[in-house]
Image (spheres, rainbow, N blue to C red):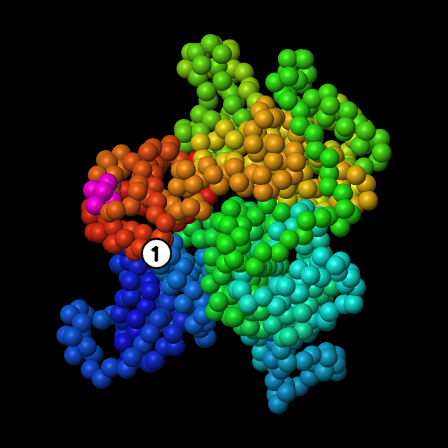
Amino acid sequence: MFLIDVFVTNSSLSVNRLYSYYYDENIDSFKRVEVYFANGKTSALVIKSKEIEDLKKEEEKLGFKLIKIIKVIDEEPIISNEQFELAKWLSKTTVSSFISCLNTMLPNVLKTSKNIKRAKENEYIRLNKNTDYKFTNRQKEIFDLLEDDMLAKDARKINNQIIKRLIDNDVIEIYKKEAEYKKGELSINDNFKELTVNQKEVYEKILNTDKLVSLLFGVTGSGKTEVYLHLARHYINKGKEVLILVPEISLTPQMIQRVKERFNDVIFYHSELNDQERYEQYKRVKDGEVKIVVGTRSSIFLPFNDLGLIIIDEEHDTSYKQDNTPCYLAKNVATKRALAFGAKLLLASATPSLDSYTRALKGEYELLRLNERINNKLPVIEIIDLIKALKDKQSFILTNRLKQEIKNTLDNHKQVIILLNRRGYSPIIKCIDCGTTLMCKDCDRPLNYHYQLGLLKCHECGRTYKLPKLCPKCGNDSLIQYGFGTEKVEEEIKAIFKDAKVERMDRDNVSRKGAHKDILDRFERHEINILIGTQMIAKGLDYPDVTLVGILNADAGLAHQDYNAAKLTFDLLMQAAGRSGRAKDEGKVVIQAFNPEHYVLKAILNQDYDYFYNIEMNYRSKTSYPPYSHLLEIMIYDNNIEHINNSLKFLEEKIDKLSYKHYRPNEIGRIKGNYRYRILITNKQLNPLINDVWDIIDEYLKQKQMAKIKVDVDPLYLE
């Protein structure tokens, strides 16, 4: 008999501990089992076991009665010891439960949950060749065409009626087993481009540095991807595995295409894959059958065996931070895994995060630069003062200058990208009589009007509403639309450039699987010559005939009350500008903004990261914001305001006793019906802060009538 310690399936911090059960046989660590818990059945993950001689004596020692495990779910462990240690570390450093971390790491088929999802199973045949069955000539002819372990559907295609008769007479046995994924064999093609002198220097330094992490600071179009591919070949030739992370699913097809040109067996891993596809890709990595992976954030958790190199492309991008619990940053996980495997980690960006660049300047990271484009031509940037343009009675969507540049570009048979980081048609519907703004009933957010849907939509919770004819407060026919989104831009451009082939790419029209790739493929084939979109079109895309990028409402992000607003705006504008003029033709960028004198816009005009960095770091030093210190956000949320008040009182008392600088709780608006309050704590040293917050959380969970709680270490947004 064995004592089995497990983590049960429940992401709540209140049950974030081991629970003991017993079983007649030993169960290997990291297998899932079914158990009774909290008046019901659920799954659990086995962590450790030990043999016991007497159940009653063990119960007396523990002080409670042990329950028997119902059954073992898995034939083999679902994670490795390295993954287990990673989940423990992730739980500790993100202040979240072990199970929430584990389930973040795994495809749905392998997650612990109340209702275990199964991998797809296929029917196969097994032949009874020693049967006494009297075959007809035709049956024997069909039987001889069959093989053991053949797919049943393939056998039925030969002659379904005869196959059915042979099954009924036990000549053929049907059995089920997990569907097998298509296996490939890696080969490296010879069509690698020769590296330039600068690329070669960077390549050699990455291979020879004794530092764990390298930062490749390369301007847009400087050939960073070619360096990645040469590095991948080096490590694959050494028998190692390579992971290339990209921030957006929209970038994955183009990166996959480039990698596949050099390596013919590549897997890609991202959120558009269905459960079975994710499981099959996951299993290929686990079985050591693939050497190179391209994927988005969650790829960092794949079950590698001998990882040699991790590359994080556009390392500054906020997509690498998960907003939901556990709120992890992919760069931190990558560093942990690189240490575990003795691998190299390469961070790369044209606009590095302030943290990464500061570490590189201090010598913690190897700093490498590619300061020139492959074509030696950065795009020409022009900033249009929208206030002056509006005084001249120009359009507030497309100024005369931008319209002229679009016309010139189309006349030259080149392509245009128009960026506006706001989807929908109009972001605000307001009554001009009483001043009422139409708001979501569940969220403290204005409703956005979507013309093509004919509905108002909340961009927080997704709830939709009919557009009222009259103001719901005063009853007057005085509702008007303020502002504009990508839908309205699309409408105006189509009205002005009637012969242009215009397409919009934002979250509203790429929800269908493969929609990203379809739009970008058509753009590449010149079936689209003006592409309008949100931030998903601002980064990573490389099309030689894009010679004009127009950026609308460029400084809108600077109005956000957020410590990171300037950096996020700078990144977006710089990356978007980098889409223009990447081949032999000169590129132009026209930026429309209300405050051209802002230091972010000045830095963009001169394409000068260091100018921006110095001003922004001076601001951060005065306010003790990252990277000069660490921020830890405790958010409490609940639809019961009494629970909120109880929680605020408890947390304030506990945090006041600590020596850390902290900010009083502030309300940040309802989302999905929940009131939300934030407490921010800051400290130069992170580990002591995390330890103290864990102690507070442990006490908090013992209290009654408290709000739900979420912790975010080093949040990227403060809304």
- Furthest-right residue in view? 412
Q: On the picture, is 150 further left or further right than 15? A: right
Few, some or many residues within 10 Å of mark 1 (<14, 14–19, 20+): few
Q: Pick the residue in front: 302 or 75.
A: 302
Q: Pick the residue in front: 169 or 540.
A: 540
Magenta residues: mostly which secondary structure? helix
Q: Residue at x 29, y 79 (%)?
A: 50
Q: Residue at x 54, y 61 (%)?
A: 213
Secondary structure, mark 1, is helix
Q: Pick the residue in front: 677 or 139.
A: 677
Q: Residue at x 80, y 32 (%)?
A: 409
Q: Residue at x 59, y 23 (%)?
A: 594
Q: Which amino acid, by three-letter code, is at mark 1? A: Asn
Image coordinates for residue 96, horizontal then vertical, percent: 36, 54
Image coordinates for residue 152, horizontal then vertical, percent: 63, 71
Is residue 162 shown above or below 596? below
Is residue 14 shown above or below 419? below
Can I make out residue 219 in this image?
Answer: yes
Quarter of the figure that contains the N terminus: bottom left
Is residue 518 shown above or below 603? below
Which of the 4 image quarters holds residue 39? bottom left
Q: How many marks?
A: 1
Can I make out residue 521 in this image?
Answer: no
Q: On the picture, is 36 further left or further right than 540? A: left
Which of the 4 image quarters holds residue 195? bottom right
Image coordinates for residue 51, horizontal then vertical, percent: 28, 82
Which stretch appears magenta?
A: 652-657
Q: On the picture, is 287 further left or further right than 686? A: right
Quarter of the figure that contains the C terminus: top left
Q: Pick the residue in front: 625 or 654.
A: 625
Image coordinates for residue 292, horizontal then vertical, percent: 63, 65
Which residue is labeled 1 in the image? 687
